[in-house]
C-alpha cells in the first residue's frame, strides 16, 4: 500500500507539473503540496480566461445591449446573443467594460430655482452638529404599490454615472394601486405607522395625524424639532395653526432625500415581498415598520451633517444620499 501511495503521489506531482508547464510557468522540483497550490492559484486567477464561451463579436454585443438599455436583464442579453452562457459570464464581460449593476438613483426633478433654495437652506444649517440633529423628528408620507417597484430595478453603468440620466429615476406623482402611509422617526423612538385612506387635506392632516399622533409624540420629547416637507396639506393654515405650539423645521421644496426618513421608506420598499392584494401589502408594511432597527435610524439621523455638506458641494443638486 505504501508503494502504491508513493507512486500515486508521483503521478499527481507529474500531472500538476505538466499542467504548469503548458501555462508557460517555469517548473522547479516542487513538492506535491506546493505544486498543487501553485496550479490551483493559477486556475483561480487565470483559468476562467482559458476557455472563452463567447466570441469578441458576441462580447461587443453584450456590452452594446447594456449601453443602449441600462435596465436590460441578463436573461434578455443572453437571448439576444443566442449563446448558452451563464449570467455570471455576462456580468464579467460587462465588468471588463467598466459596467456594473447598481440600483436606480432616485431624485426629484430640480429646476435652477430649486437648487438655489436647497443650497441656501443647507448653508444656513451647515454648522448644526449631530447633537442638534438628534433632536429632530423626521416625518413623511410614502406610497407602497402593488407590482414592481423601481427600488428593485437595477441599471448597468460606469462609476460616476449614478446621478445622471438614464441612471436616475425621477420622482413624479403617479397613482397606482397601493397603500399610502405616514410615519415619523426620532433618535430613540418612532411613531405609529398610520395608513391614510382617501385624499389627504389640511383638515384631515390635523384630525387624523397631527392631533392624535404628532402632538402626543412631540410632547414626550422635550426640545424636539418637528420636520415635515412642503406638500400642500402640511402648509395649509389649519396645519400651521396647530403646529405653532411646537418647534418646527422649515423644509426646502423637492428635497425628500435630505430627510432621514426618506431612506427608511427605501429600506422598507427594498425588503417588501410581492403582495397580491392591498390588504396584504398594508399588513406587510406595518410589520416591517414595527421591526425597524433603531440603530439604523440613529445612523440615518447622524448622517444629516454629511447630507447637507454633500448638497452644498453639489451646488444644491442631487447627491449620493
Image (tube, rainbow, N blue to C red):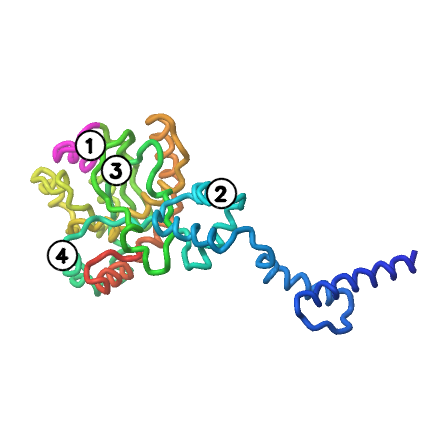
Q: Is residue 210 magenta?
A: yes
Q: Quadrant of the C terminus?
A: bottom left
Q: N-terminal of the two: label 1 or label 3? A: 3
Q: Nearer the viewer, mark 3 or mark 4?
A: 4
Give the residue at mark 4.
112
Going 22% across and 36% down the picture, which residue do you hit? Answer: 174
Q: N-terminal of the two: label 3 or label 4? A: 4
Going 47% across and 51% down the picture, which residue do you hit? Answer: 58
Give the residue at mark 1.
208
The image position of residue 7, as x and y in percent, is 87, 60
Question: Few, some or many C-alpha atoms within 10 Å of disc 1 (few <14, some 14-19, many ≥20)?
Answer: some
For residue 40, above or below residue 184: below
Residues 214 and 6: in front is 6
Give the residue at mark 3.
182
Q: N-terminal of the two: label 4 or label 2? A: 2
Q: Is residue 164 magenta?
A: no
Residue 224 horizontal side relative to residue 81, left or right: left
Q: Which mark is residue 82?
A: 2
Residue 264 horizontal side relative to residue 18, left or right: left
Amino acid at each position: 500500500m505504501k508503494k502504491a501511495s508513493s507512486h500515486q503521489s508521483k503521478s499527481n506531482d507529474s500531472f500538476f507539473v505538466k499542467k504548469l508547464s503548458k501555462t508557460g510557468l517555469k517548473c522547479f522540483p516542487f513538492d506535491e503540496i506546493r505544486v498543487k497550490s501553485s496550479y490551483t492559484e493559477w486556475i483561480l486567477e487565470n483559468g476562467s480566461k482559458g476557455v472563452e464561451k463567447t466570441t469578441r463579436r458576441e462580447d461587443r454585443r453584450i456590452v452594446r445591449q447594456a449601453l443602449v438599455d441600462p435596465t436590460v436583464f441578463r436573461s434578455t442579453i443572453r437571448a439576444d446573443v443566442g449563446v448558452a452562457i451563464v449570467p455570471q459570464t455576462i456580468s464579467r464581460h460587462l465588468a471588463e467594460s467598466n459596467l456594473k449593476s447598481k440600483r436606480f438613483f432616485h431624485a426629484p426633478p430640480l429646476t435652477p430655482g430649486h437648487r438655489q433654495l436647497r443650497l441656501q437652506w443647507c448653508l444656513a444649517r451647515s454648522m448644526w452638529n449631530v447633537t442638534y440633529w438628534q433632536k429632530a423628528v423626521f416625518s413623511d408620507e410614502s406610497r407602497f404599490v402593488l407590482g414592481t417597484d423601481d427600488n428593485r430595478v437595477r441599471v448597468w453603468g460606469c462609476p460616476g454615472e449614478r446621478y445622471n440620466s438614464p441612471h436616475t429615476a425621477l420622482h413624479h406623482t403617479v397613482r397606482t394601486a397601493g397603500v399610502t402611509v405616514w410615519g415619523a422617526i426620532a433618535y430613540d423612538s418612532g411613531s405609529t405607522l398610520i395608513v391614510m385612506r382617501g385624499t389627504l387635506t389640511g383638515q384631515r392632516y390635523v384630525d387624523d395625524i397631527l392631533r392624535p399622533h404628532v402632538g402626543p409624540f412631540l410632547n414626550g420629547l422635550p426640545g424636539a424639532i418637528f420636520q415635515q416637507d412642503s406638500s400642500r396639506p402640511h402648509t395649509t393654515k389649519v396645519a400651521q395653526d396647530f403646529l405653532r405650539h411646537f418647534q418646527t423645521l422649515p423644509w426646502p421644496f423637492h428635497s425628500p432625500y435630505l430627510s432621514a426618513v426618506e431612506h427608511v421608506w427605501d429600506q422598507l420598499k427594498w425588503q417588501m415581498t410581492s403582495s397580491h392584494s392591498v390588504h396584504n401589502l398594508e399588513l406587510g408594511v406595518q410589520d416591517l415598520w414595527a421591526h425597524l432597527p433603531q440603530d439604523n435610524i440613529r445612523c440615518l439621523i447622524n448622517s444629516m451633517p454629511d447630507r447637507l455638506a454633500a448638497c452644498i458641494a453639489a451646488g444644491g443638486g442631487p447627491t449620493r444620499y
